[in-house]
Amino acid sequence: MRTIFTLFFIIALAGKLLAGQDDRGYLVRIGQEAPDIELTYPDGKTISLSSLRGKVVMLQFTASWCGVCREEMPHIEKEIWQTHKADTNFVLLGIDLQEDAATVARFQESTGITYPLLLDPEGKAFYTYAAQGAGVTRNVIVAPDGTIAFLTRLYDRQEFNEMKEVINNLLKTPKNMSDNSYNPRFMREAIRLAVENVKNQSGGPFGAVIVKEGKIIASSGNTVVPDNDPTAHAEVNVIRKACKALGSFQLSGCEIYTSCEPCPMCLGAIYWARLDKVYYACTQDDAADGGFDDSFIYKEIELKKSERSIPFENHREAGAGEEFRLWKATTDKVAY
């Protein structure tokens, strides 16, 4: 019997892994781009998630028959909606799973919520984010750059408070702080991303956010392992996202907050991106203690090319240098 149970458990676990499902029933993870979904208002108008790019979006999946949802929703109304509803950079959308407009209207009235409650009659939106058979009570926080910043399941007070803090971090800095001064909220967000990365096995223990004019415009964790990309450090990822969000290959006027002092590769990327300032939490020594020793690379740079652990050989074949001659001669090039 024990052998049969063990075999069943292994098969079930393998099924989850193959489906990309985590242990809370999510098909998505923090740091990835939020899948686009289209939702319907009770009056028949529609809205897509992609149309809200540039704003902090909270997707609250719910249903009238869900007791935990009914417990959580008054807290969402009082502690999140009433706090941020006047902020044009914040959008909260309740999403009712597979119920008609009349049922949703009664549900909204009975809970006393005033934030929008939209329809998902076929469950297409919900099952884009959660696996078939997964529980409905869950919240997804989407950052202005379109990536997933936080995920909740059920109503856990500690997790709910963490979600509130994430929303606060993603929205405007307090008015008593200048746009370019150090903000501990942004650093806490970078640290949170690093911690979540480890908990969710989404990559290495690093997180970073980029801030412009007192607002987070991009955030990311390290995704070296899931992306099979040795350059997918948190700082490189977040620079790419910020450049995409701003439509620019330079990030002048922006600061980066990173959970750890950047490695040589990320340091180079930061200089190429022209970021105004770098704030970091942990140091090179902390990283080395955790098994990420960047000092080796710094030492390699100082060595003669032939003495490095990966030898560098110069072979100047015919035609080498022509590309730079052409570049210098091009009058309409975009210099960087």
Image: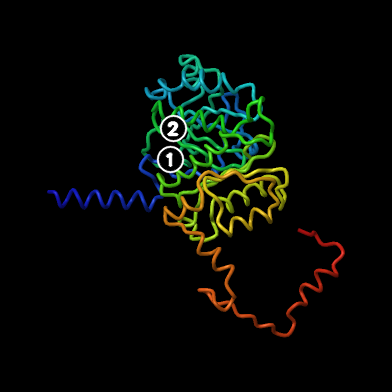
Rendering quarter of residue 211: top right
Q: Is residue 33 left or right of residue 103?
A: right
Q: Name the secondary structure under disc 1.
A: loop
Q: CA distance from mark 2 to mark 1?
A: 9 Å
Q: What residue is disc 1 on?
A: 130
> Is residue 53 or residue 130 the one in the foreground?
53
Circle 2 Cα neighbour tier, 10 Å, few/some/many (<14 / 14–19 / ≥20): many
At 46% from the left edge and 57% from the top edge, which residue is drawn?
292
Find the residue positioned furthest to the bottom.
318
- Provide residue 202's location: percent of width, then percent of height: 44, 49
Q: Is disc 2 in contact with disc 1, using a CB cutoff of under 8 Å?
A: yes
Amino acid type at mark 2: Arg
At 63% from the left edge and 56% from the top edge, which residue is drawn?
269
Amino acid type at mark 1: Ala
Say which mark, if any, is on residue 332: none
> Is residue 108 or residue 304 the one in the foreground?
304
Rendering quarter of residue 153: top left
Rendering colour mode = rainbow
Q: What residue is disc 2 on?
A: 138
**Quadrant in the picture for the C terminus:** bottom right
At 48% from the left edge and 25% from the top edge, which residue is drawn?
100
Q: Name the secondary structure under disc 2.
A: strand
- Provide residue 28's location: percent of width, then percent of height: 46, 44
> Is residue 43 or residue 263 the one in the foreground?
263
Instruction: Please count the marks in the image.
Output: 2
Circle 1 Cα neighbour tier, 10 Å, few/some/many (<14 / 14–19 / ≥20): many
Q: Earlier in the sequence, mark 2 or mark 1?
A: 1
The vertical placement of 93 against 218, above or below, is above
